[in-house]
Image: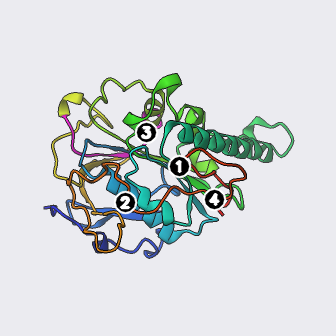
Amino acid sequence: MLPDLVGEGALPSPTGGPGRQGGVPFAVEEHRLEPVWLDLFRGPPHFLVLGDAECGKTGLLRLLARGLAARYRPDEVALVVVDHRRGLLDLAGLPQLAAYATDAGASAEVVEQLRTRLSARLAGRAVAGRGGSGDPKGVPRWDGLPSRPPPVHEPRQVVLVDDYDLLPAATGGLLAPLLDLLAHGGELGFHLVLARAVAGSARSSFEPVLQRLRELGVPGLVMSGDPHEGPLLGGHKAALLPPGRGLLVGRRRPAVLVQVAHCPPTGPAGRQPVAPGDPMEGSGEPRGGAPVDRGVSRTPPAGVGAVTGAGGR
């Protein structure tokens, strides 16, 4: 039986575990209470988190960011955070943080910078794959296999998007420029972790980015929400669950109930951590740190740092 609360310290260290390169522990599963790892680099490159307010999805994004930062140097992984409610501001101190966008203008600029960088990677890999001969067999393609490493000296770009349902939907959504790159995520070193509410999922089922992720068979976590929204992932509906609880759905394995480790924000000294389900969790109140601005040659919009080639350095 799953516990109601799992502390972050109960999980293995992200830097440990032989054979777990790329994996980040984030939960325990219900059968043997063993750690559950998310491996974006050797497995499917993207991940969906679906859950309503106070379910713990913001804490999950924080946990994944901290785990990646503990395992990888800034020249190996660049974190790009789109967080309009500012619930993840405590991540601003991570050296792996290449960009933090807190409004529509900043998000659009970050996404366009990322699209340009990834498109150049894709073009470069296509030319290298053909060997200059024009042989179409050398062109990289999405084949459903585990992620391949990105080009040498290029960090993996891990994009964490919180409250995707609150982002402006005009002109197809802020992430629309990345739509055609999602299928090439593994080979480009492009990884999207997208969190949104269950509420309204039925109305947004044909939103282009979510539709493409479902077409690619992206795994995900279905947390607490209204079951009347219908099937969300792999035919599974949401249910009313305790904070941190969710159904882990993958393409090639049975769904399993897990308890995500509680990962409160790092606040000012003396401030009490926020408990799961606390209305302050993910409320958008700044919790320490500030938007970053690394390697920017001009003044960016408020709340954005440039997507750099070396994780912000």
* Residue 140 sits inside the magenta stretch: no
Calculate the distance from the C-alpha at mark 3 to the C-alpha at mark 1: 33 Å
Q: Is residue 271 above or below residue 85?
A: below
Q: Helix, strand, or loop for circle 3?
A: loop
**Residue 152 x/y as whole percent:** 72, 60
Q: Helix, strand, or loop for circle 2?
A: loop
Q: Which stretch did the figure color magenta?
A: 214-226
Residue position marked by numbered label 3 in the rendering: 217
Quarter of the image holding residue 232?
top left
Q: Which quadrant: the N terminus?
A: bottom left
Q: Is residue 22 visible?
A: no
Q: Is residue 269 above or below residue 211?
A: below
Amino acid at the residue labelled 2: Arg
Colour logic = rainbow
**Residue 96 x/y as whole percent:** 56, 63
Label number found at residue 294? 4
Main SS class of the magenta portion in the image:
loop
Calculate the distance from the C-alpha at mark 3 to the C-alpha at mark 4: 35 Å
Amino acid at the residue labelled 1: Gly
N-term-proximal mark, 4 vs 2? 2
The front one of 175 and 20 is 175
Calculate the distance from the C-alpha at mark 3 to the C-alpha at mark 2: 35 Å
N-term-proximal mark, 1 vs 4? 4
N-term-proximal mark, 3 vs 1? 3
Residue ID at (20%, 53%): 277
Calculate the distance from the C-alpha at mark 4 to the C-alpha at mark 2: 20 Å
Residue position marked by numbered label 1 in the rendering: 303
